[in-house]
Image (cartoon, grey):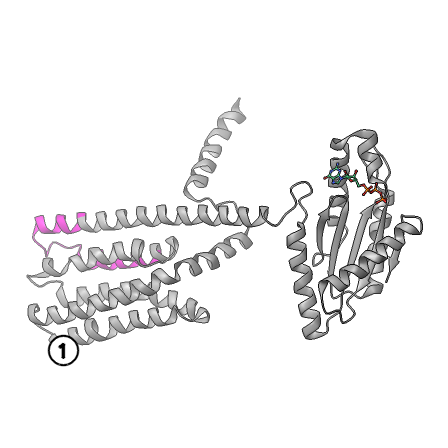
Amino acid sequence: MLATCQEKPVRLIQHLKQSLDPLHDSSPATCAHFAAWYRHAKVAQIRYVAFLTMALYLVYAAIELNVASDAHGLRLLLHGGVIPGLLLATGLMSFRPTLHRPMIAVLMTAPTFAVAVNLHFNYGHADFAHFAPELYLNLIWTFAISGLRLRQAMLTASISALIILAVTFTDSLQPGVQRLHLIWILASFSFGLLCAQVLEKAYKEIFLQHRDLALSASTDGLTGLWNRARIDQFFAGELARAQRYGTPFSLILMDIDHFKNVNDSHGHTVGDNVLRQFATLLRQNVRNVDKVGRLGGEEFLIVLPEADAQQARAAATLLQQRINAFVFDTVQHKSASFGVTQYDGDRSTQAMLDRVDRALYLAKANGRDRIEVL
Ligand SMILES: Nc1nc2c(ncn2[C@@H]2O[C@H](COP(=O)(O)OP(=O)(O)OP(=O)(O)O)[C@@H](O)[C@H]2O)c(=O)[nH]1
């Protein structure tokens, strides 16, 4: 009972975290993958927003010259030169993927710089209220328009808001105006934060759906191994690498012996289970870099990068031993036959596949539960 009472708040917090952040219990690798995906997805937004904001600052600088009472030269330099320059640099860096990190750094710095410039010129002047909207818009821009990630925007907007509050949180403004100023800061910050939170959550959900779709399009539904299309891609990729760099690689083609008997004697459900157990055995007994796919039925293809025929035969021998020692559900013992071949200057995947298929045929013809290398 006590445990249940203690578990409830924990579960509530978990639920809250999950609803705020769909990636909150994802691995660091997934988070890093999301960060890269998000940056890529946001590049166009960052570019157009940077160019548009740059153009608006140029117009603003021209108008400001007629409105401001002092420091015309410096205002023109900063609002017509430095800030548009930072935005131009951001927009241009967006075209170069290698410059995306510095681009984000500039994007995080520019809004705080603009806030400092505004306060420097206008705070303490009678017409401060006319220039203050730039500060409020700056906070919303940082959160909802800039294209920064939530925590990047949060850091930038918090520094900007702290600077604004530190400079303006005195009574030098008229009391009513002071309160209005504070409520606009609060409104800009909270609306901006809410918007950034909702946007980032939506992006994370799209990312997860995208990843799940990509995975289900690449995997075999029954065994969870790579499907025919995906293993063919790995195979073609290895062949291209071998043709270009001369690196060895090998294939193992494995076929379960007398699998039809399993279905005929015990039914398809037992057959499916045996296929799943074979898949687990294969996955657990190859190297991390090896790719295991189901070609269809009870036939499996393993692509072994950087392995010659001797190493591939050793890998097949290990699999054969593990299979022979394994006790399968219902059918107890099963064996498999293996064809092995290594890259031999082949021009196409088909040539190599034909050779490994012949090796497997030999293994079957020579009595099954064997390995043949061609
Ligand atoms: N349970 C199940 N059976 C499948 C699946 N796909 C193919 N099969 C069956 O696998 C069997 C393959 O039989 P055969 O091609 O005759 O081969 P075999 O009995 O293993 O004989 P050898 O390969 O010559 O040792 C057929 O009965 C197919 O119906 C599947 O997804 N699930």
Q: Is residue 181 above or below residue 65?
A: above
Q: Which quadrant is the C terminus positioned in? A: bottom right
Q: Position of residue 25 (x, y in %)?
A: 52, 45
Q: Position of residue 295 (x, y in %)?
A: 72, 49
User: Ligand 1 falls in which quarter?
Assistant: top right
Q: Is residue 271 above or below residue 99?
A: above
Q: Which residue is mark 1?
A: 73
Q: Position of residue 99 (x, y in %)?
A: 43, 71
Q: Please, what is the dominant secondary structure of the magenta stretch?
A: helix
Which residue occupies 61% across, 50% down?
Answer: 218
In-image side of 38 versus 179 (left or right): right
Q: Amino acid at mark 1?
A: Gly
Q: Count of labels shown?
A: 1
For disc 1, the neighbor class at 10 Å (few under 14, some 14 to 19, many from 20) is: few
In-image side of 62 versus 144 (left or right): left
Which residue occupies 80% across, 66% down?
Answer: 308
In-image side of 292 versus 97 (left or right): right
Is there any visible trace of residue 162 in the rendered image?
no
Was residue 158 drawn as part of the magenta stretch in this picture? yes
* Residue 251 vs residue 285, the one in the foreground: 251
Q: Which residues are magenta?
A: 155-183
Which residue occupies 68% across, 40% down?
Answer: 222
